[in-house]
Image (tube, rainbow, N blue to C red):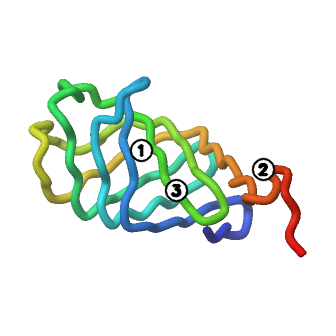
Amino acid sequence: MRFRDGGGVRLHGEIGELWIGPTKVGLLYRWQLEGWERDWRLDAERYRLEPAANGNRNVDLVLDFRIGELRASGSIWTDFVADGTSHRAIVIKGGALKLQRAVPAKEATGASHR
């Protein structure tokens, strides 16, 4: 994760998840997110959406990193197909990025290392 001057962010990764409410509806492959805390754009080389997406453009992103998990809500800006198979390129834009830091294993269990 790399923050730019002035609070901007530029992230990239191999796989991300798309959710609608409590239901995981798809995956993003080779994605890049760039922008600001409340104004960002994600471009993915490929995506897969399940029929459960049912034409809904409003999605939540879940992107995992070593230091934690980034969650964000956004809208799909490109045409898309929700048929459970892989397709080329998708763009999602949104705001309100939220990073949840991972809890180290020793803190999660209360154990200590020597």
At 82% from the left edge and 54% from the top edge, which residue is drawn?
107
Where residue 6 sits, quadrant-wise, is bottom right
Label 2, label 3: how many angstroms apart (C-alpha)? Answer: 21 Å
In the displayed structure, 95 sits above or below 111; it is above
* Circle 2 residue: 109
* Image mark for residue 50: none
1 or 2: tag closer to the N-terminus: 1
* Circle 1 residue: 93
Question: 40 left or right of 104?
Answer: left
Assign a secondary structure to mark 1. Answer: strand
Other residues around mark 2 within 10 Å, as few (<14) / some (14–19) / many (≥20): few
Label 1, label 3: how many angstroms apart (C-alpha)? Answer: 18 Å
Assign a secondary structure to mark 3. Answer: strand
Assign a secondary structure to mark 2. Answer: helix
Q: How many marks?
A: 3
Residue 11, given in percent of the width and then of the height, sits at 52, 65
2 or 3: tag closer to the N-terminus: 3
In the displayed structure, 37 sits above or below 22; it is below
At 69% from the left edge and 54% from the top edge, which residue is drawn?
102
The quarter of the picture where the N terminus appears is bottom right
At 42% from the left edge and 25% from the top edge, which residue is drawn?
22
Looking at numbered disc 1 in the image, what kind of residue is underneath it? Lys
Label 1 vs label 2, nearer the camera: 2
* Circle 3 residue: 64
Residue 110, given in percent of the width and then of the height, sits at 85, 51
At 56% from the left edge and 62% from the top edge, which residue is drawn?
65
Looking at numbered disc 2 in the image, what kind of residue is underneath it? Thr
